[in-house]
Amino acid sequence: MPDITRTREETSRALLDTGERRLALVLEHSQRLMTERDPATLLRHVAAAARDITQARIAGVGLMSDDGQRFQDLVSVGLDEALTEELKRQLVAEPDHPARRVVENREVVSGTNPGGDPVALCLPASHPPIHSFLFVPIASPARVYGWLALIEKIDAPAFSEVDTLLATTFAAQAGVVYENARLMVQLQTQAEELRAQKEQTDFAMTAARIGVSYRDLGSSWVVVSTSLARLLGLPNDPGGMSQDEIYERTHADDRARVRAAVEKAIRERSDFNLAFRMVLPEGLVRWFQFDGRVALDDQGEPARVVGVLADITDRRSLEMQFRQAQKMEAVGQLAGGVAHDFNNLLTTIIGYARFALDRATDGEQRHDIEEIVKASGRAAALTKQLLSFSRRHVMETVSIDLNHLIVDMVTMLRRMIGEDIELTTALAGALSGVRADRSQLEQVLMNLVVNARDATKGGGAIQIETGTVTFEEEPAVPQGLKPGPYVTLTVSDNGCGMSDETKARLFEPFFTTKPRGQGTGLGLATVYGIVMQTGGGIAVESEPGHGAVFTVYLPVDSAPAHVPERVVEPQRASGSATVLLVEDEQAVRELVRIILERAGHSVVEAANAEEGETLFEAMHEVDLLVSDVVLPGRSGFELFHRLHAKQPSLRVLFMSGYTDYAMFDETIVEPDLAFLEKPFSAEGLVTKIREVLSQ
């Protein structure tokens, strides 16, 4: 007879062993869940572990949307991929699936399906037969995330109460771990977004040369942004620096002013802004704009100082250059206007002095008159320099090979600077031509070499170089120049150099560092005016004790000079021409009339363009119009165009010591027409008229 007691003990022991093993599985898988941080991997682990713990043939985890209203995803273990995808579609389309009760009511749904037909459980017909099922919620105390589905208990018709207890316990723990994993992912995503935003902000602030700082008033430590640390030359991510260290880095001349502005803002609980200099570790001095605010605490008391610092060194430099350009333009306009009026006076003085010299017979009288003429000539040269500076000098432009011009002048330049100074040249090959007035370009080179000579007193070296450069885009183009190709003329020396203060005033007329009486201060001003008038630019590099480098940029001549042909009738080479003279300055007009009449010409004079046109209408024929450029009302250009339209054979000679083409309509300005620069001599006027009439 069998031992019933022993059989029961063995059965109990077997059940106990099985229960302990399953509990061990729960603990093992729970520990693994705690280490998992990826939500998707965690759910697959939940499905596999639950199947193992409950001895189910198939396990799956279904997820709901964040609002809990829609099915979102399914992870399965024991089903092939195609069937899993079909089941996902079925779950989306079937609102009465048993899992719906699990999610909505947080209840466990279990049971059997004796026929095994999956359709009875709202599943696809292709699903394997289902005889038993168990659905438990996956949830945290805060919300339900989905369900755990266990299908087809192995070697049993249904899932037991122990299966339900283990599955429910494991699913609850999975819900908490899943929630933590989601939160971790969200935190990581937010951290990445914050880091990306910080990097973008740091990049933008660094590119804009802006930084941020703040200091709690109870502390002397100033926290600075990464961008500000870079601006101040600090190590990467220093965190901050002490207030005393910031004041130490502030320029000595600005330190007291900055400290006073901050302390005043704290006392008055106000905003503040000021510009000051800071000395970087490498010794560079940079300008900063400091816009600050005093933040208040809940009691309305000052709590911290917050500030934005912007490096404005480049902006201040541009502003200074702009102000300097405005000043130079204003001085140029003044100089040009004075020189214009002075030239009219000199024309009259020189002309009548020549008349007096021609009539004088006494030697002493002739000597006195000759001195008047010489002095007037020196005054004329001075006004010519002023007009060059103001860019209103009459220019006769041609295409020039800069290398040939230098070669032609180098012997004369060596004699001029003396044997104790070495002069060398470095001329670039295949140099493009430049369009300029040759005499003025010679003046530029000579003035630059003379300036270098004066800087190398007692021996030294001067080098003249030529080259080409092309500026492609606006940011790389030196101030005042346009993008395009340029020929460069560089004059360098190893002389005494100059300070920043001297460089700032270098091209101002009458500014000189020479002792009184040893220089007019117009040499470099003349260079500046000529170069600007050609459409070029000039740059200077110099430091005290390290010489100087002057680089002149001249636009490349894109096309050869073109002189428009005019069909004219043969005219008399000299004498007996009919001349219409238009000049608003009476003394100059009378002088020119006397000179022309003495040369045998018939002269009709007018004081302005309107009177000149009226007289022209009354005259039978006019051989030559002699006119000032700047006239009351219409200009000399406009007058000539109106008269030329009525008489195409009319020739013209413009008199001027001042030509500002910008003030005239560019459609009527023809620089190729004949000009005579004031002041002029009687011989010069007669000769120029002879040339015009013989064309």
Image: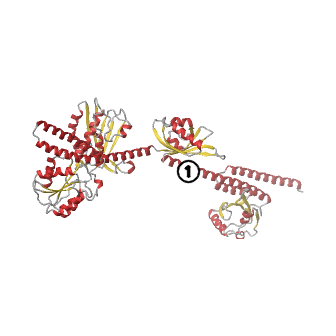
Residue shown at 15% from the left, 54% from the top: 692
Residue type, label 1: Gln
Please name whichever residue, 677 or 550, is drawn nearer the observer in this view of the structure. 677
What crowding class fits label 1: few (fewer than 14 Cα within 10 Å), some (14-19), or many (20 or more)?
few
The x, y position of residue 407, in whole percent, is 21, 41
Residue shown at 62% from the left, 62% from the top: 81
Please name whichever residue, 574 or 496, is drawn nearer the observer in this view of the structure. 574
Please name whichever residue, 89 or 315, is drawn nearer the observer in this view of the structure. 315
Query: Disc 1 marks which residue?
Result: 197
Please name whichever residue, 592 or 229, is drawn nearer the observer in this view of the structure. 592
| Residue 478 in sight here | no
Residue shown at 54% from the left, 48% from the top: 199
The x, y position of residue 514, in whole percent, is 31, 34
The x, y position of residue 574, in whole percent, is 10, 53
Dividing the picture into quadrants, the one containing residue 87 is: bottom right
Dividing the picture into quadrants, the one containing residue 624 is: bottom left
Residue found at the very far top of the displayed protein: 458
Viewport quadrant of the C terminus = bottom left
Question: Is 250 placed left or right of 106 in the picture?
Answer: left
